[in-house]
Amino acid sequence: MEFTERLNALSNKIKQQTGIIITEEATKTAFVMPFIHNVLGYDVFDPSEVTPEFICDVGTKKGEKIDYAIMKNNEVQILIECKKIGEPLNINHASQLFRYFHVTNARISILTNGQVYRFYTDLDAPNKMDEKPFLEVDLLDIDENIIPELNKLTKSSFDLESIINAAGELKYVSQIKKVLHNQLNNPEDDFVKFFASRVYDGIITQKVRESFLNLTKKAASQYINDQVNERLKSAITGIAPPAPGSQSEPQTTEEEVQKDDKDIETTLEELEGYHIVKAITRAVLDAPRITQRDTKSYFGILVDDNNRKPLCRLHFNRSQKYIGLFDIEKNETRHPIATVDDIYSFADILKATANLYT
C-alpha cells in the first residue's frame, strides 16, 4: 500500500477498536506497534531494529525503561514513550524521554497515546529535548499537509540531517497555525484592537472593542468561507484562483518571457519540493539565501533570489515530473522523478551546486 493508504488503514482500526482498548499495553499492541511496523516501516520483530523496553541507566536511576527504541547500526535513532489510548498527552508524560534523550544518540523522540503522535528534537539546546514538538499527528484527524513530513521519518526515507533542518520551520509554522486558530475562534483583546485600529477612525473604547470582537470573528469566518468557495469554484470551472504569494518570473533569456501573477499557481507539491531542497542545501548555505520563484513553465529554486544562481528547477506541471539540475556552466539536465521525496536522491548534486555560491 501507499504511505497515505497505510495511515488511513491504521486510522480506521483506531476508530473501530478504541472502545475495547483499556490498558497501555493493549494500546501498544493494537496501535503503536502497527504504527512503527506498517506506517514507519521498521521491523518490530527484529530487536536489533526495534528494541522494546529499552534500558539505559541514567544517573542514580537504574533499570529505567523506555517503551521502544528504534535502532540503526546499534545506535538509537528514535525513542518512543507510550500512554494509554485516550489519555491526554502533556510534557509531564515525557520525563523519561527527556532523560534518555540526553544520554543516548537519539535526535528524535515520540510521545504517543496511539492516536496522537508528538515528535520532538533538540532545536532549542543541543542534546536537550525541546518542550514543544516540531510535528504532531492525530490519526483520527490527519492533516494532509504533514503527510510528506511524516513520510521522512520512515525507514526507507529516513534522513536525520534533513529532518532536523526542516524541524525548525515545521515547529514554528505549526505553533503559528495554532495561534491563528485560537485568535480566529476566540480573539484576544490585542488581536481585536489590531484590526479595529486599522478600520475605525474614532477612539477605541471598551464598547468599541466589544463590538469589534464580534465583527472580527464574523469577518474571519466569512473570509475563510470565501477562500473555500473560491477553491470550489476553481475545481468546478477549471480556472485557478491567484495563488497567494506567487511571483512573476523575471526574464532570464530572450526566450523566457515574464509571466503575470494571475497565470501562475504554486502547488503544494512545488512548495514541498522547495522545502526539501532547502533542507538539503542549508547545510551549505544560510537558509535565507535559498529562495524560490514560480513561473508558468517551471518552479525555480535560486540563491540570493538571483536567476544567475540557480540551484535547481522543478518541472511538476506535467504527468512525468522532472528535477532540473545544473552543472558548473549552468547547463540544465532534467532527471525524471516519481515522487517529491525522490529529490533526496540528488542531495549530493544539490550540495555540490550550492557550494558554487559559497
Image (cartoon, rainbow, N blue to C red):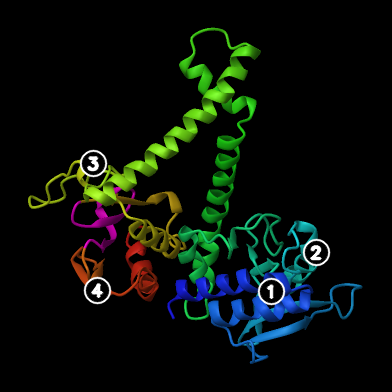
Type of amino acid under label 2: Ser
Residue extending farthest to the right is: 60
- Front residue of this view, candidates 233 and 106: 233
Q: Earlier in the sequence, mark 2 or mark 1?
A: 1
Type of amino acid under label 1: Leu
Q: Earlier in the sequence, mark 3 or mark 2?
A: 2
| Residue for point 51% across, 23% down | 195
Q: Please give the residue where the numbered disc 2 appears in the rendered image.
A: 95
Residue extending farthest to the top is: 202
Where residue 180 appears, x then y in whole percent?
55, 40
Q: Please give the residue where the numbered disc 3 appears in the rendered image.
A: 261
Type of amino acid under label 4: His
**Crowd band around label 2 with a 10 angstrom C-alpha radius: few (<14), some (14–19), many (20+):** few
Q: Please give the residue where the numbered disc 4 appears in the rendered image.
A: 335
Which quadrant holds residue 129? Answer: bottom right
- Mark 2 to mark 4 CA distance (whole Å): 47 Å
Q: Earlier in the sequence, mark 3 or mark 4?
A: 3
Inspect this view and state whether residue 40 appears. Answer: no
- Mark 1 to mark 3 CA distance (whole Å): 46 Å
Callout 4: helix, strand or loop? Answer: strand
Q: Please give the residue where the numbered disc 1 appears in the rendered image.
A: 79
Q: Earlier in the sequence, mark 2 or mark 4?
A: 2
Q: Earlier in the sequence, mark 1 or mark 3?
A: 1
Q: Earlier in the sequence, mark 4 or mark 1?
A: 1
Discs 2/4, front: 2
Type of amino acid under label 3: Asp
Magenta-drawn segment: 296-317
